[in-house]
Image (cartoon, rainbow, N blue to C red):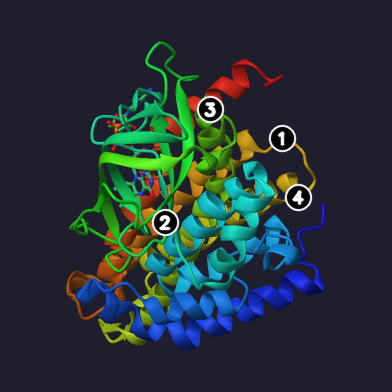
Amino acid sequence: MDFRLTDEQELIRRTAREFAETRIAPIAAAIDQEERFPVETVRELGALGLMGMNLPPEYGGAGADFVSHAVAMEEISRGCAAHGVIMSVNNSLVCWPISAYGTDEQKRNYLPDLASGRKLGAFSLSEPGSGSDAAGLQTTAADDGDALVLNGTKAWVSNGGQADVYVVFVRTSKSHKHRGISCLLVERDTPGLTVGAKEKTMGIRASSTVQLSFADARVPKRCLLGVEGQGFEIAMKTLDGGRFGIAAQAVGVAQACLDEALAYAAERQAFDQPIGHFQAIRFMLADMATNIQAARWLTLHAAFCRDRNEPFTKWGSMAKLFASRTAVQCADANLQIHGGVGYTRDFAAERHYRDAKILEIYEGTSQIQHVVIADHLMHPSR
Ligand SMILES: Cc1cc2nc3c(=O)[nH]c(=O)nc-3n(C[C@H](O)[C@H](O)[C@H](O)COP(=O)(O)OP(=O)(O)OC[C@H]3O[C@@H](n4cnc5c(N)ncnc54)[C@H](O)[C@@H]3O)c2cc1C
């Protein structure tokens, strides 16, 4: 098996790494402390072709494969986890479902602007009363001639504060749980839609996570993505594809932790020697590096299977489960290696520690990844 990247994939890695090191990493601490959405660098991500990576060029995309997507996600997230989630949502949770289920008109209307960074998208499945059990969503969409009338509250919408368009999942039928869900493309300026205040999150503070409230918001039926009742399928297929992206985000965060831990271990003196001379520290570094490499290969393998049109759901869940755990462990080890200063806001170790935890929660918690993996083990034909 050959894990080497092609020349094109290497070029994308170098481009993303250089951008992350020169434009993103230098502002990561400030935008975290100020909880400021990085409008300018997100536009620049678009100009680099990183906001619609897998879209065909006819819709303004970079036409890249999913391995390239994973590689770029890792590099951007190594610079700043918040930029990683902004990029991931736009690519995997917005551009992808529109390209897979949209009409020609919907694709032409949204994809070029989303891919270029002129516009931003958000994905709105969760509600205050339903997260893991997504089919329990309660926001209703009542039939009213050529429109659907939305009422209800959506929760945890990443990119929501800045988004121009929302991929929103609503209930169009109460008699069927899963098949009663439909998906709509809702524009930000829709009368009756209120975008809530930014949530006060523990980490990824530069991203904007908000609630959306719908009060008799009329959305034309031509904004349905796919057909009525197809929403749950769209949500699950979209999240399936998003997971290796979050795994790549986790690898990037973990790698940033290892980079910093190595540098600090070489520099910090204790007992007349660098702390990197102590076996206790060396073994932590060795475990970090080993887990990161395993997580990276699980992630690239999931992306590789997707590129080959092979089943990748189980691989994507394994990658997300393992890589997010690795990020949390590496963030903990990095902070420990930094000792007291790691616990202050003067060092990035503290930010990584807060950023890493979300990777085990969004786009399916670790428990839900266990459910998915076990389901595939018990029913291999799925
Ligand atoms: C910062 C942030 C950003 C987010 N961004 C988005 C977004 O852009 N769009 C969006 O739609 N959502 C988003 N989410 C929501 C996120 O996907 C959910 O929080 C997540 O799916 C978990 O749902 P929940 O919070 O309702 O927890 P619950 O589903 O209530 O779960 C609570 C606990 O029970 C466990 N649990 C639940 N069911 C099972 C089961 N069957 N077996 C074992 N354990 C189980 C869970 O693992 C968890 O530990 C975001 C969340 C956060 C915090």
Question: Image check: 212 left or right of 182?
Answer: left
Badge 3 element: loop
Q: CA distance from mark 1 to mark 3?
A: 26 Å
Amino acid found under the numbered disc labelled 4: Asp
Q: Is residue 11 above or below residue 160?
A: below
Mark toward the start of the polypeptide (3 vs 4): 3
Q: Which residue is mark 2?
A: 327
Tell me, yes or no, if residue 324 can be seen here: yes
Residue at screen point 39% across, 32% down: 170
Q: Residues within 10 Å of mark 2 (few under 14, many from 20)?
A: many
- Determine if the C-beta at disc 4 is less than 8 A from ligand 1: no
Q: CA distance from mark 2 to mark 3?
A: 39 Å
Circle 2 — which element? helix
Q: Earlier in the sequence, mark 1 or mark 3?
A: 3
- Identify residue for label 1: 311
Where is residue 176 shown, x and y percent of the image? 44, 13
Q: Tell me the residue that label 3 is attached to.
A: 228
| C-alpha separation, residue under disc 2 versus residue under disc 1 | 25 Å
Q: Point out the frontmost of discs 2 and 1.
A: 1
Q: Depth check: give the residue in front, 273 or 338.
A: 338
Which residue is at the far top?
Answer: 175
Name the amino acid type tagged 1: Pro
Q: Which residue occupies the foreground of this view, 184 or 353?
A: 184
Taking the spot 51% from the left edge, 45% from the top edge, the residue there is 320
Q: Position of residue 218 (x, y in %)?
A: 36, 41
Q: Is residue 76 left or right of residue 104?
A: left
Cβ atoms under marks 2 and 1 closer than 8 Å: no
Q: Quadrant of ligand 1?
A: top left
- Disc 2 under 8 Å from ligand 1? The reply is no
Q: Is residue 66 above or below residue 279?
A: above
